[in-house]
């Protein structure tokens, strides 16, 4: 099509949308100082620097804990400095084994500038002075990288990282329960009402699970319509009560699409650390076997791994 033809094409609308000035966002202003992970560990994660001194390291007592063997227990600290009316942030290495690097150069202590890269072991942070637009951007990036966009549940890499970190804490706190789940009847929904209906069910499954679990719990998408959860510092008996809440919420939900109404249920298998396994793989295997038993027992039920 020639450019002149486009001007008269009724199917082409090249008019510019005029925005009311009152609806336009205010000019960005500095909102907060943060470290943003740009390599290693949890890419896209924001660490807000709100305290006078912020310690980063592998220790459970660090302000920001990085579960990486290349990071020392207390690797480095970020300090807010006030001098004669001037306020800035500085990074100080805490005699770490692998040292701290600023923009590729080893440092003992140095003033930070917006955009500086700080490397601790195999993890690289970017020091940023964020405005509201930056805050939203980094939050969106983190969401895209670590969460399934359909269900809102953690992707498996992110879930395993959080589970591994929680198991480190559990060695001091005592226990943790893991759950494997699978929807009952999704194939029937797909066959009877189409894959759009099935996709809607999986999306709502994620929303209902997130609604039912506690703030400290974590849920991930294991694959398809299977999810995986862990309940920190929680016995299998207490976790079973949360699982029952999930079961009741999903069983009670009626879906509607194209004039059709339908529903699904959920089966769940639970295992407890260290009662049913010392490793993530052993815990998953025990919970998966319990899930298989729940399916074999008529579905829409909860089974716990045997002692």
Image (spheres, helix red, strand yellow):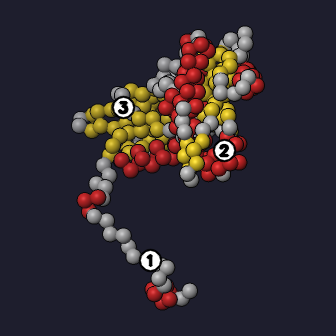
Horizontal relation, residue 187 to residue 68: left or right: right
In contact (CB < 8 Å): disc 2 and disc 3: no
Spatial CA distance of label 2 from label 1 is 40 Å
Nearer-the-camera pick, 133 or 303: 303
User: Which residue corresponds to mark 1?
Assistant: 13
Nearer-the-camera pick, 2 or 50: 2
Label 3 residue SS = loop
Residue drawn where x is 68% and y is 48% of the image = 192
| Mark 2 or mark 1: whose residue is earlier in sequence | 1
Residue drawn where x is 30% and y is 59% of the image = 24
User: Which residue corresponds to mark 3?
Assistant: 50
x and y percent of residue 209 in the render?
55, 32
| Mark 2 or mark 3: whose residue is earlier in sequence | 3
Horizontal relation, residue 85 to residue 65: left or right: left
Spatial CA distance of label 2 from label 3 is 49 Å
Label 2 residue SS = helix
In contact (CB < 8 Å): disc 1 and disc 3: no
Q: Nearer the viewer, mark 2 or mark 3?
A: 2
Q: State the residue lying farthest toward the left.
A: 85
- Residue 3 versus residue 49 in the image, above or below: below
Spatial CA distance of label 1 from label 3 is 48 Å
- Residue 33 versus residue 92 in the image, above or below: below
Graded by Cα atoms within 10 Å as few (under 14), some (14 to 19) or many (20 or more), the crowding at tag 2 reads some
Picture disc at residue 238: none
Nearer-the-camera pick, 3 or 115: 3
Q: Nearer the viewer, mark 2 or mark 1?
A: 2
x and y percent of residue 84 in the render?
23, 35
Residue drawn where x is 49% and y is 79% of the image = 11
Label 1 residue SS = loop
Q: Is residue 163 at least partly visible in the picture?
A: no
User: Which residue corresponds to mark 2?
Assistant: 189
Quarter of the picture containing the C terminus is top right
């Amino acid at each position: 099509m020639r450019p002149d033809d486009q001007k008269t094409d009724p199917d082409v609308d090249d008019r510019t949308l005029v925005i009311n000035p009152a609806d336009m966002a205010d000019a960005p202003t500095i909102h907060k100082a943060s470290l943003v992970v740009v390599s290693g560990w949890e890419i896209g994660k924001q660490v807000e620097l709100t305290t006078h001194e912020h310690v980063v390291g592998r220790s459970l007592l660090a302000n920001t804990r990085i579960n990486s063997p290349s990071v020392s227990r207390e690797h480095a600290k970020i300090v807010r400095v006030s001098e004669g009316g001037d306020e800035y942030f500085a990074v100080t290495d805490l005699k770490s084994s692998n040292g701290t690097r600023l923009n590729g150069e080893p440092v003992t202590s140095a003033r930070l500038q917006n955009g500086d890269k700080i490397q601790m072991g195999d993890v690289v942070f970017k020091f940023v002075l964020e405005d509201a637009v930056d805050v939203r951007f980094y939050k969106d990036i983190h969401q895209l990288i670590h969460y399934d966009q359909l269900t809102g549940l953690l992707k498996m890499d992110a879930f395993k990282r959080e589970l591994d970190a929680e198991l480190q804490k559990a060695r001091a706190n005592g226990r943790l329960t893991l759950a494997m789940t699978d929807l009952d009847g999704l194939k029937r929904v797909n066959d009877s009402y189409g894959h759009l209906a099935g996709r809607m069910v999986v999306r709502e499954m994620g929303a209902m699970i997130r609604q039912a679990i506690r703030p400290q719990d974590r849920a991930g998408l294991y694959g398809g319509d299977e999810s995986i959860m862990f309940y920190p510092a929680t016995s299998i008996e207490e976790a079973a009560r949360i699982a029952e809440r999930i079961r009741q919420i999903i069983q009670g939900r009626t879906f509607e699409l194209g004039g059709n109404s339908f529903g699904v249920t959920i089966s769940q298998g639970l295992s407890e650390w260290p009662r049913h396994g010392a490793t993530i793989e052993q815990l998953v295997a025990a919970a998966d076997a319990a899930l298989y038993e729940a399916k074999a027992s008529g579905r829409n039920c909860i089974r716990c791994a045997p002692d």
